[in-house]
């Protein structure tokens, strides 16, 4: 981290002065790691028409946090990760073994997860207010150890994209064709859903459950407006996420607002710009 702090000290900001505001420097590094993660996963979320899946995962992660807290765990995050992965696997299984639309299955799982979470959180007259911080998030509270975890997840997701992207894309766009070519569609979808589950769960305490879904939809949706091929699609999604992430962090620092909300608003503005440029090309 010392090397990172030295590099940040070269920036022309008051919080970049050496030895001061380490929380802001940690937050900037977290944004630089989180944004490519969401940018990559966003392309698959958009193509798979699963834009509300991350929202449902957020609900399941909240339930995992509530269970971990009830069990008295020091860090309930790991319970939330486990619960979200199980949730993702169950969702994939039900989705593959029913004729219901994805949004219907997502609605069933999402409503069940949030109801279970609220039930556990308020069990015995408990107060829900202690979980309010999860709704908004606080990127300034991110710790170096969690940044290292996010970086490890980024490396794993990049490896997944390099080794299995073609299979993942075919399985999401045309499952029947993927089956005919010998691709194990269920396990491809399960792997993809688990990747989203881990990223959403680990990031939710910093981004906030209320807006985390937008970070998995807007980068890919904006990139799709301009991209002419898959390479451009991924590049624009990652670049848009990075620029909006850094801009949102800086804006939230100087105006004193939620970082997650600021990032979302910049992403929405980026989507509007790309939409107008797309209309202009037609």
Image (spheres, helix red, strand yellow):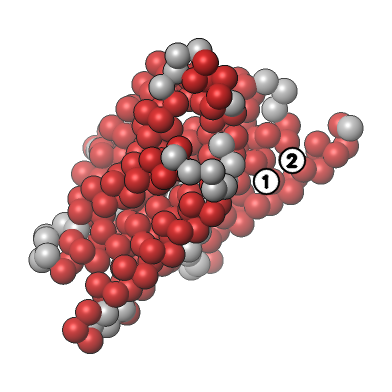
Question: Element type at marker 1?
Answer: helix
Distance of label 1 from label 2 (alpha carbons): 6 Å
> Where does residue 15 sit, x and y in percent of width and height?
40, 54
Looking at the picture, does residue 32 appear above or below residue 136? above
Looking at the picture, does residue 252 appear above or below residue 33? below
Instruction: Residue 199: tell me if it is visible.
Output: no
Which residue matches tag 2? 274
> Where does residue 47 sit, x and y in percent of width and height?
60, 35
Left or right, 272 with reference to 123: right
Report the residue at 73% width, 36% height from top: 225
Report the residue at 16% width, 57% height from top: 75
Looking at the picture, does residue 133 appear above or below residue 105? below
Report the residue at 41% width, 45% height from top: 94
Whether the residues at callouts 1 and 2 have beta carbons within 8 Å, the answer is yes
> Where does residue 259 sit, x and y in percent of width and height?
47, 59
Left or right, 47 with reference to 109: right
The quadrant of the picture occupied by the N terminus is top left
Report the residue at 29% width, 75% height from top: 119
- Which of the numbered marks, if any, corresponds to residue 20? none
Circle count: 2
């Amino acid at each position: 981290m010392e090397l990172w702090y030295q590099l940040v000290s070269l920036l022309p900001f008051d919080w970049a002065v050496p030895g001061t505001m380490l929380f802001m420097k940690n937050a900037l590094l977290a944004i630089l790691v989180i944004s490519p993660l969401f940018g990559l996963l966003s392309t698959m979320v958009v193509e798979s028409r699963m834009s509300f899946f991350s929202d449902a995962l957020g609900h399941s992660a909240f339930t995992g946090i509530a269970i971990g807290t009830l069990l008295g765990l020091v860090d309930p995050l790991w319970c939330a990760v486990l619960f979200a992965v199980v949730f993702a696997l169950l969702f994939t299984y039900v989705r593959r073994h029913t004729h219901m639309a994805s949004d219907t299955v997502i609605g069933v799982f999402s409503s069940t997860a949030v109801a279970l979470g609220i039930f556990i959180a308020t069990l015995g007259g408990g107060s829900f207010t202690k979980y309010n911080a999860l709704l908004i998030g606080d990127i300034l509270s991110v710790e170096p150890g969690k940044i290292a975890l996010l970086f490890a997840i980024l490396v794993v997701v990049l490896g997944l994209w390099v080794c299995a992207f073609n299979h993942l894309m075919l399985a999401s766009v045309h499952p029947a064709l993927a089956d005919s070519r010998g691709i194990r569609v269920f396990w491809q979808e399960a792997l993809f859903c688990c990747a989203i589950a881990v990223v959403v769960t680990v990031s939710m305490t910093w981004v906030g459950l209320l807006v985390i879904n937008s970070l998995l939809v807007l980068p890919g949706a904006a990139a799709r407006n301009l991209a002419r091929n898959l390479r451009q699609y991924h590049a624009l999604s990652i670049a848009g996420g990075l620029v909006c992430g850094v801009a949102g962090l800086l804006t939230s620092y100087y105006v004193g607002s939620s970082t997650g909300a600021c990032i979302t608003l910049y992403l929405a503005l980026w989507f509007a710009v790309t939409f107008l440029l797309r209309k202009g090309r037609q």
